[in-house]
Amino acid sequence: MQTVMRVAGALRLQVVVRGAGSGLSGGVVAPPGGVVLSTERLGRILEICPEDEIAVVQAGVVTGDLDRAAGQYGLRYAPDPASADFSTVGGNVATNAGGLRCCKYGVTRESVLGLEVVLADGTLLTVGHRTIKGVTGLDLTGLFVGSEGTLGVVVSATVRLRPLPVDTRTMVVFADSLASVGTLVQAITRSRVQPSAVELLDESSLRSIDDNRGTDLARRGRAMLLLQTDGHGATAEMDELTQVVSAAGGAPHRLEGEEADRMVELRRSGRGSLKDTWRIGEDVAVPRSRLVEMLAAIGEIGARHDVEVGCVAHAGDGNLHVGLSAPMRPGEVAPPPRIHAAADMVVRTALDLGGTITGEHGVGALKRPWLVRELGHRQLELQRAVKQVFDPAGILAPDSFLASDGTRRRSR
């Protein structure tokens, strides 16, 4: 990695870092004449220290493999994106990835204690600590997490592990509308119980799972809520959530064993894709108090633009994944303008409700058009100035969210 960056710096070659290539915002697309630097072979778990509850792993380690390795010591790696079985730790660090358990354990940043990073000039920089606490100087570790390859190449990470829960409880609730299930989420939030997962699927998503896996979820309701609690208080917390859901008009159904595991797996990877269909996916987040408004707006946006709308949400932290689709028409070679218009309105609505253009997928190249609206010109200028310090020649991730007109497409 250091040699590649030294050569690239000397020749002014632009470099894009690629992990598993599972990102959804176009962050690993290299410019013409640029270099794609893969971390795939950095696949070793260097250390698991159960006494300190930490692990040191190379960037190419698959997230799920780390979680399973930690499990042998009675520990877990808490961040769990739906792509955990193929995305890598380095990619998760780059985008500050989230997942199903985020509402209790936080996104990747909350589990990263330290990093080894190769800078644009080939220097190997170590930042952070092996200790749980550490406040010496500026938080450069936090700065690199979520930087999407713009400041350096993450080659290894020291991550925090958590005790493997002694108990996990699961519940599903089916509702007759998206608004109803959104109301249930509000009741759960007000209860002050801390679930480990609060996942929402709309009717379109349920039908997609049914078509792909032969299930009958859509027959049971037009929306579904999947809840989990974990730890020593899992049963007591689920008992309380059962009461909360019932009082709010829901019909809770507790799941056990393989049935519970199956439902979680369907949420992660059960949906399929339709042939001859244009599709755009959006990743936005809103304050939890505005979730019901956002859900209602998504349905209106789909109807207004004549596109099919599907919504899967990490409802416990207000993060919505909105799929917009339309059948391909004869002669079309690109998604029709109405899908792009609908996607634009989804993002703008999230911002209007006090939200953000991305909850966990990152900005990449695809979400750059909305960046100024969220951050403002001054903050974006400051972020570009930070990049200038780490990468004065502008060779890293040249078409990223920090790109300026003077740095894009400049490779030989």
Image (spheres, rainbow, N blue to C red):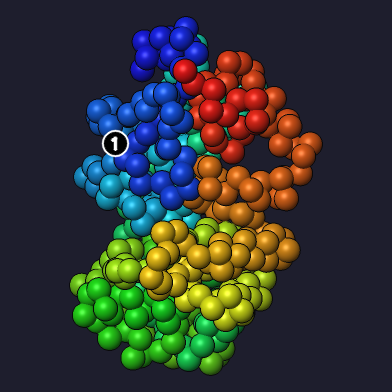
The answer to whether residue 352 is seen in the rendering is: yes
Q: Position of residue 120 (x, y in %)?
A: 50, 17
Quick one: 166 or 354, which is closer to the camera?
A: 354
Residue that label 1 marks: 61
- Height in image: 102 above or below 258? above
Quick one: 258 or 10, which is closer to the camera?
A: 10
- Height in image: 307 above or below 216? above
Which residue shows up at 42% across the image and 42% down it? Answer: 92
Quick one: 263 or 29, which is closer to the camera?
A: 29
Is residue 350 left or right of 254 when viewed as pictured? right
Label 1: few (<14), some (14–19) or many (≥20) C-alpha neighbours in 10 Å: many
Q: Position of residue 236 (x, y in %)?
A: 43, 74
Which residue shows up at 33% across the image and 91% down it? Answer: 219
Q: Quick one: which residue is furthest to the top in this view?
A: 10
Which residue shows up at 56% across the image and 68% down it? Answer: 338
Is residue 256 left or right of 252 when viewed as pictured? left
Q: Quick one: which residue is furthest to the right in this view?
A: 378
Amino acid type, callout 1: Val
